[in-house]
Image (cartoon, helix red, strand yellow):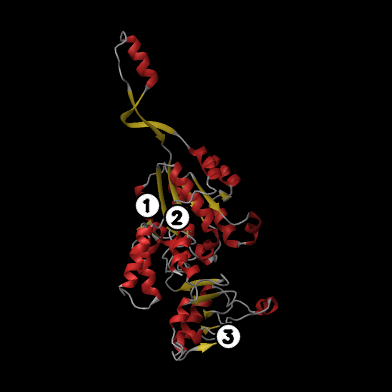
């Protein structure tokens, strides 16, 4: 099993060496860890992964290779945890039944009703339509269905209908080493190139050297110039998590292309809409954030702003204070978007969602309007249109 795991890691793009693999086997032989899958995960990751940016690749290979392995370590007489029972069966409704479930009546009504339920409810509920629970049609809870509700404690999105999410989710950083399929993106991004020679004179100016040497009666006269580089400055804001999980690959390709094309590139992550805080590392996004106002003050207006996201969210997240699915935002997303656009007049939004879906998604229409129709599809053609707009 472990030999196959080694080769799968290699096939997955992780350059695991024989020495590192033998180190892992030696530690297992010495019983450094107990028979615990989680302990083995951390031990193998520590031995086999040399760069934190590759953790996501390792996780995908580990999950695929060891899927179901925990069942082998569960004793026959083990008591089934109560948490397993709470998730029993995910509710399966027909399209007709789903259409009959109506929304609670808007954001204010939804939050008011939730507060009332929290005060009244005294026990766990499952499969109902009113109380906070699991597997039902109530607007509050997890593993059920409601066209407009609040998700509490569920591991990941299913219907992508929640107005607010009350759980702590972990997102992965984008992999900027991905090269496959980025060539056309690089060609499109090169439209933004604006070369300049600045800094110390470290590069030989051959034409001027030849001319000066000839004028100096053949005595060598070296002439140096600063290195020629792309002077374009770019701020890249990337939406991660939730519905953006479907677009990770194309965003990685864009991130990789932009990282290689622009010397002056600064990037930040956000979720759904920009609010008062951004972050550089998704693994530490709950503890280490950069105030958006600090970004506005640090990077001047000559930066070109590129926002990347599917713009698919509840309209509350754009219109209302407190509309964010993950925290209480004092000011609406629209307010922060206007601040960004006032500070960076050269700005575009790249959307990985197919354009034919845009007219049917209210949040996309709202953000496109805020962007003054500077929203383009995340395709090669869309990139070229967006780059022309930024010139």
**Tag 3 secondary structure:** loop
Does residue 107 lie above or below 288 as drawn?
below
Could you tell which of marks 3 and 1 lies nearer the N-terminus?
3
**Tag 1 secondary structure:** helix
Whole-angstrom CA distance, mark 3 to mark 1, is 45 Å
**Residue 384 percent location from the top left of the image:** 57, 42
**Residue 229 percent location from the top left of the image:** 40, 34
The image's mark for residue 295 is 1
**Tag 2 secondary structure:** loop
Q: Disc 3 designates what residue?
A: 129
Q: Nearer the viewer, residue 283 or 315?
A: 283
Does residue 177 lie above or below 231 as drawn?
below
The image's mark for residue 175 is 2
Q: Nearer the viewer, residue 156 or 35?
A: 35
Residue 145 placement: quadrant:
bottom right
Going 33% across and 72% down the picture, which residue do you hit? 29
Crowding at mark 1 (Cα within 10 Å: few <14, some 14-19, many 20+): some
Q: Of tags 1 and 2, which is closer to the observer?
A: 2
Going 47% across and 49% down the picture, which residue do you hit? 256
Could you tell which of marks 1 and 2 lies nearer the N-terminus?
2
Whole-angstrom CA distance, mark 2 to mark 3, is 42 Å
Question: Does 379 sit left or right of 42 as displayed?
Answer: right
Residue 18 placement: quadrant:
bottom left
Could you tell which of marks 2 and 3 lies nearer the N-terminus?
3
Question: Does 292 sit left or right of 181 as displayed?
Answer: left
Going 49% across and 53% down the picture, which residue do you hit? 252
Q: Nearer the viewer, residue 5 or 147?
A: 5
Q: Are marks 2 and 3 in contact (CB under 8 Å)?
A: no
Does residue 212 lie above or below 349 as drawn?
above
Q: Residue furthest top?
A: 217
């Amino acid at each position: 099993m472990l030999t196959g795991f080694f080769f799968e890691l290699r096939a997955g793009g992780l350059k695991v060496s024989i020495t590192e693999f033998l180190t892992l086997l030696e530690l297992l032989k010495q019983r450094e860890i107990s028979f615990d899958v989680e302990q083995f995960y951390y031990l193998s990751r520590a031995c086999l992964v040399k760069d934190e940016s590759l953790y996501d690749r390792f996780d995908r290979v580990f999950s695929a290779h060891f899927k179901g392995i925990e069942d082998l370590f569960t004793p026959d007489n083990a008591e089934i945890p109560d948490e397993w029972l709470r998730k029993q069966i995910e509710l399966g409704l027909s399209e007709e039944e789903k259409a009959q479930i109506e929304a609670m009546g808007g954001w204010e009504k939804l939050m008011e009703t939730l507060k009332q339920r929290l005060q009244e409810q005294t026990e766990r509920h499952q499969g109902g339509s009113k109380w906070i629970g699991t597997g039902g049609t109530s607007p509050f809870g997890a593993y059920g269905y409601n066209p407009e509700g609040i998700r509490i404690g569920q591991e990941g999105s299913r219907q992508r209908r929640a107005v607010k999410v009350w759980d702590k989710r972990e997102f992965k950083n984008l992999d900027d080493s991905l090269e496959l399929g980025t060539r056309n993106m690089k060609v499109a991004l090169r439209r933004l190139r604006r070369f300049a020679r600045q800094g110390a004179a470290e590069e030989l100016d051959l034409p001027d050297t030849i001319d000066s040497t000839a004028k100096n009666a053949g005595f060598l006269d070296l002439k140096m110039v600063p290195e020629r580089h792309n002077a374009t400055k770019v701020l890249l804001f990337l939406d991660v998590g939730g519905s953006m999980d479907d677009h990770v690959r194309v965003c990685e390709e864009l991130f990789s292309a932009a990282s290689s094309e622009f010397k002056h590139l600064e990037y930040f992550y956000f979720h759904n809409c920009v609010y008062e805080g951004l972050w550089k590392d998704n693994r530490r996004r709950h503890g280490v954030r950069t105030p958006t106002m600090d970004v506005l003050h640090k990077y001047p207006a000559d930066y070109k702003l590129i926002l990347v996201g599917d713009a698919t969210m509840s309209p509350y997240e754009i219109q209302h204070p407190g509309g964010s699915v993950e925290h209480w935002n004092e000011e609406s997303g629209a307010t922060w978007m206007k601040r960004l656009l006032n500070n960076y007049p050269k700005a575009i939004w790249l959307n990985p969602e197919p354009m034919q879906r845009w007219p049917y998604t209210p949040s996309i229409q709202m953000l496109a309007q805020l962007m003054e129709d500077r929203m383009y599809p995340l395709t090669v053609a869309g990139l070229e249109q967006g780059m022309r707009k930024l010139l």
